[in-house]
Amino acid sequence: MPATHPHLPNGLPRPVQIQTQSFRANRPSIAGPDTPEPPYPILLEGVVQHGFGRGSKDLGCPTANLPDESLPDMVAAVKPGVYYGYAQVLPLEGQKSRLRPEDHQVWPMVMSLGWNPFYKNERMTAEIHIMHEFSDDFYGYNMRALVLGYIRPELDYTSREALIEDIEIDKKVALASLVRPGYKYTSDPFFSNHDKA
């Protein structure tokens, strides 16, 4: 199911809240309840695609894009915004991995689902930042993501610096939210115990 264009039926742009200093000042340091509640967990899986190349270059936050066909369950269940959970990157069957064994472990992630209004995207994307330093890129690898909670709505920004600052806060909120006992999902059966590259 392709994602829809960010416009209302009358052709006007879909309204998106502008990030403000007061919004940032009031952001909680932990998001969501003490254990995931429906519709979470949401399971996503797909082969990592090339995106716009802005994550590393523009924002200092490398992201992996999931293909459109992996998104319908998430799009149907939640609104655009920033989410947290865990992700794992694995080679496809028969593919030799360029990554280290530890790169195939399950790591915390933060995910942006939406149109990225600052960049005026024409289509919805799911961009996942895995909080781990990988030894190489993993385009063409399979990624499994377990989305466990919601951090904040999708926002527009008046500057790239403000966007970068919020991304850094998103990472901290995700990590603080995932250390709670109710979020111990790294050994969930959805993930593979892939112990060899």
Image: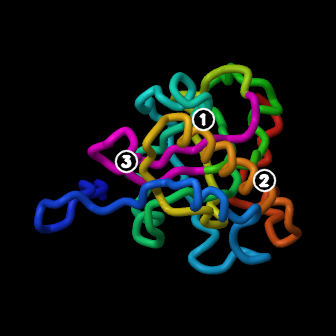
Residue 42 to residue 145: above or below:
below
Q: Residue at label 1?
A: 93
Q: Residue at label 3?
A: 117
Residue 135: percent from left, percent from top: 73, 21
Q: Earlier in the sequence, mark 1 or mark 2?
A: 1
- Residue 175 disc label: 2
Q: Secondary structure at mark 2?
A: helix
Residue under the point 85% across and 60% down: 179
Residue 120: percent from left, percent from top: 32, 42
Q: Earlier in the sequence, mark 3 or mark 2?
A: 3
Residue 174 to residue 41: above or below:
above
Q: Which residue type does callout 1 highlight?
A: Glu
Q: Nearer the viewer, residue 101 or 53?
A: 53
Q: Earlier in the sequence, mark 3 or mark 1?
A: 1
Q: Which residue type does callout 3 highlight?
A: Pro
Left or right? Give the position of 125 relative to 59.
left
- Chain part drawn in magenta: 111-133
Left or right? Give the position of 78 relative to 136.
left
Q: Residues within 10 Å of mark 2 (few under 14, many from 20)?
A: some
Q: Is residue 129 magenta?
A: yes
Q: How is the image coloured?
A: rainbow
Q: Secondary structure at mark 3?
A: loop
Decide if residue 187 is in sight here.
yes
Decide if residue 68 is in sight here.
no
Q: Is residue 20 magenta?
A: no
Cα–Cα gap, marks 1 and 2: 31 Å
